[in-house]
Image (cartoon, rainbow, N blue to C red):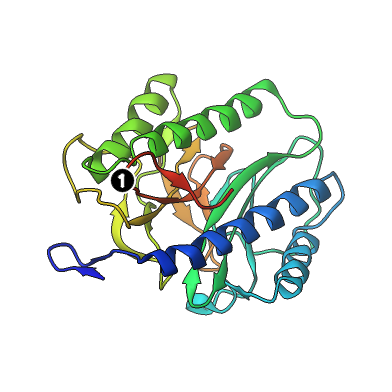
């Protein structure tokens, strides 16, 4: 059902069941990839794990071929923020890697991202991952019927910025459902009480991207990989969330 005022698709119970299944599947695949992360593994090997698990679950990859993206996961290492292309690059002790992936069930999408440490990391990287995840959890807590998209972004901004991190502002969360990217955009900053009003049946991909250094980003020559402008490391966590009559439901869990 389409909300004519906002062009936001409100999902039916049946459609939500497809998205819940898609979310559960990608969460399980993410767990399998996490167990494989260690110094020496390549990002294409992680992509291959995802491909095999998607095939095993008899579902479709959300990313492969979308806008001509060549792989099933985005694998972004260290200063790479999002949309890194898997390759023969070997992960090293002290790296961090963000993996973003999703699947399609009966025409409905899931979208999920986590950042992992590789071996032993410095405390500042451990804090970066912990704080970025906490900002996601705070944002999800604002996903309540009657609140607004601006409340979600504000929760991230007011937690992250006082800690001195760079907050990525030119890439955002989004609605999700029949396509990977639907209205509304969900920035990681905002003014409470502004933007689209949250109503039951809305499904959103909430995804803070946080840098140890500055906010600024740049696009690499491959046309996909987004990196921090100052080379500082970046973290990215994302869940697909359902707005209900009561508390938010994380579908990618």
Q: Is residue 230 above or below residue 222?
A: above
Residue situated in front as seen by the camera: 70 or 35: 35
Position in image of residue 95 (x %, y %): 73, 40
Foreground pick, 37 / 102:
102
Give x and y (percent) for residue 108: 47, 71
Give above or below for 8 relative to 159: below
Name of the residue lying farthest toward the right:
40
Residue at 65%, 27% (x, y): give it.
126
Question: Residue at horizontal 14%, vertical 68%?
Answer: 4
Q: Is residue 206 left or right of residue 151?
A: right
Query: Element under label 1?
Result: loop
What residue would you read off at disc 1?
245
Task: Decide if residue 150 is in sight here.
Answer: yes
Q: Is 148 left or right of 132, judged from the image as shown?
A: left
| Residue at x 64%, y 69% (from the top left corner) | 72
Q: Position of residue 76 (x, y in %)?
A: 62, 52
Q: Quadrant of the N terminus?
A: bottom left
Expressed as whole percent of the image width and height from the top left, the position of residue 114 reads 61, 45
Tell me if I can see residue 214 in this picture.
no
As drawn, is 250 to the left or to the right of 183?
right
- Which corner quadrant of the image does residue 3 belong to? bottom left
Q: Residue at x 51, y 39 (%)?
A: 230
């Amino acid at each position: 059902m389409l909300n004519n005022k906002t062009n936001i698709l409100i999902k039916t119970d049946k459609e939500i069941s497809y998205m819940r299944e898609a979310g559960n599947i990608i969460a399980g695949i993410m767990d399998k990839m996490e167990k494989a992360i260690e110094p020496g593994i390549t990002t294409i090997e992680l992509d291959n794990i995802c491909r095999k698990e998607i095939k095993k679950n008899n579902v479709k990859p959300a990313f492969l071929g979308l806008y001509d993206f060549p792989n099933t996961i985005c694998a972004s290492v260290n200063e790479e923020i999002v949309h890194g292309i898997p390759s023969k690059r070997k992960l090293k002790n002290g790296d961090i890697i963000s993996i973003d992936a999703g699947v399609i069930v009966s025409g409905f999408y899931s979208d999920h991202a986590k950042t992992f440490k590789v071996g032993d990391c410095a405390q500042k990287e451990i804090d970066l991952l912990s704080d970025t995840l906490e900002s996601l959890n705070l944002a999800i807590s604002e996903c309540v019927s009657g609140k607004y998209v601006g409340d979600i972004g504000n929760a991230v901004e007011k937690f992250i910025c006082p800690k001195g991190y760079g907050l990525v502002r030119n890439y955002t969360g989004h609605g999700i459902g029949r396509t990977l990217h639907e209205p509304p955009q969900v920035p990681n900053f905002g003014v409470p009480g502004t933007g689209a009003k949250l109503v039951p049946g809305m499904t959103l991909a909430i995804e803070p991207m946080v840098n140890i250094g500055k906010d600024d980003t740049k696009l690499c020559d491959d046309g996909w990989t987004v990196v921090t402008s100052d080379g500082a490391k970046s973290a990215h966590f994302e869940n697909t969330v359902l707005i209900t009559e009561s508390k938010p439901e994380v579908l990618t869990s």
